[in-house]
Amino acid sequence: YKIGQLYMISKHSHEQSDRGEGVEVVQNEPFEDPHHGNGQFTEKRVYLNSKLPGWARAVVPKIFYVTEKAWNYYPYTITEYTCSFLPKFSIHIETKYEDNKGSNDSIFDNEAKDVEREVCFIDIACDEIPERYYKESEDPKHFKSEKTGRGQLREGWRDSHQPIMCSYKLVTVKFEVWGLQTRVEQFVHKVVRDILLIGHRQAFAWVDEWYDMTMDEVREFERATQEATNKKIGIFPPAISISSIPLLPSSVRSAPSSAPSTPLSTDAPEFLSVPKDRPRKKSAPETLTLPDLEKKATLNLPGMHSSDKPCRPKSE
């Protein structure tokens, strides 16, 4: 999944970028952290002006983007989102991957000790997604991998598939603006949940495309796709170096890139808009888990957390 994650992020960003909007890659460099070791640092700009609600477009600049900074030390990653126009707004996501199906209740105790958290399980096969994002070819209930034999997942699949892994995510949203804080924070959690559900469904459905790739091959795919994406949205492609870079100052929070990398839909991920109440399927456990492809590369993706408080996944 270390390779599958990189492949999915690059391909999805390219598909969802067009007409001056989408995901621009500003920097993608190797990075070394004294605690986490070697990793990869990326900085991106997510342009989404036309995707904002009318009230937001009236007050933000014509060229509006969110900055994503990510540090990937797989199996541990950190992603942060900020906006210079909204200095009191931020999203912080920490991700840890373990070889289980979401049974580690204390995985984020060190990062969020004594903090109230709400747990949200996400099931890539059985949870409903917004209709505008649905593709039958990316539905784990219908897809079957030719290379791995995995697929056509049915309710309860996490109890029968081995090996399996879980993606735990601790999501913290802050929007410290009186009168809007609760509404915006709750909605952003909902958007993040949908993004993670869609992205990991795609990682599973695209497995035959990335399963045989080496790390060097997926890095080359990432570089070529990022340059093509920048051209697609009208940004001159930056030189994406693969040489080592100096250690960032300690004031810069070390962390890795969280998957998925903020995919956007041309139909408008309603960022900062009023959340719509839509029923969640209650019959299936809400765990973002994927079956693994082999014992070496387990695939199962759980725990995204949705609330205005930090969240952690919980045992099923």
Image (cartoon, rainbow, N blue to C red):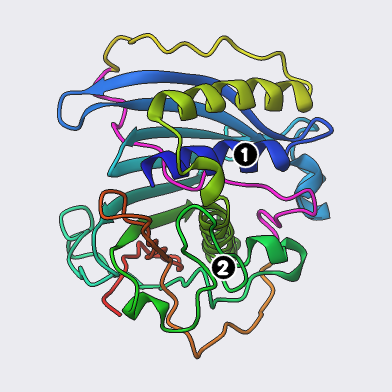
Residue 106 pos. (x, y %): 17, 66
User: Label 1 belongs to which residue?
Assistant: 11
Residue 87 pos. (x, y %): 53, 38
Q: Is residue 186 left or right of residue 264?
A: left
Amino acid bearing label 2: Pro
Q: Is residue 63 left or right of residue 244?
A: right
Residue 71 visible to the viewer: yes
Please state the extent of the stretch shown in magenta in the rendering. Answer: 249-273
In contact (CB < 8 Å): disc 2 and disc 1: no
Residue 44 pos. (x, y %): 56, 29
Amino acid bearing label 1: Lys
Q: Nearer the viewer, residue 157 or 29?
A: 157
- Which mark is in front, 2 or 1? 2
User: In the rendered image of this protein, does residue 48 appear above or below residue 116?
Assistant: above
Q: Which mark is residue 148?
A: none
Residue 53 pos. (x, y %): 78, 55
Q: Nearer the viewer, residue 16 or 3?
A: 3
User: Label 2 belongs to which residue?
Assistant: 140
User: In the rendered image of this protein, does residue 292 appear above or below residue 208?
Assistant: below
Q: Quadrant of residue 99?
A: bottom left
Residue at x 71% of width, y 66% of height: 136
Locate the C terminus and report the quarter of the image it occupies: bottom left
The total number of labels drawn is: 2
Q: Is residue 46 left or right of residue 52?
A: left
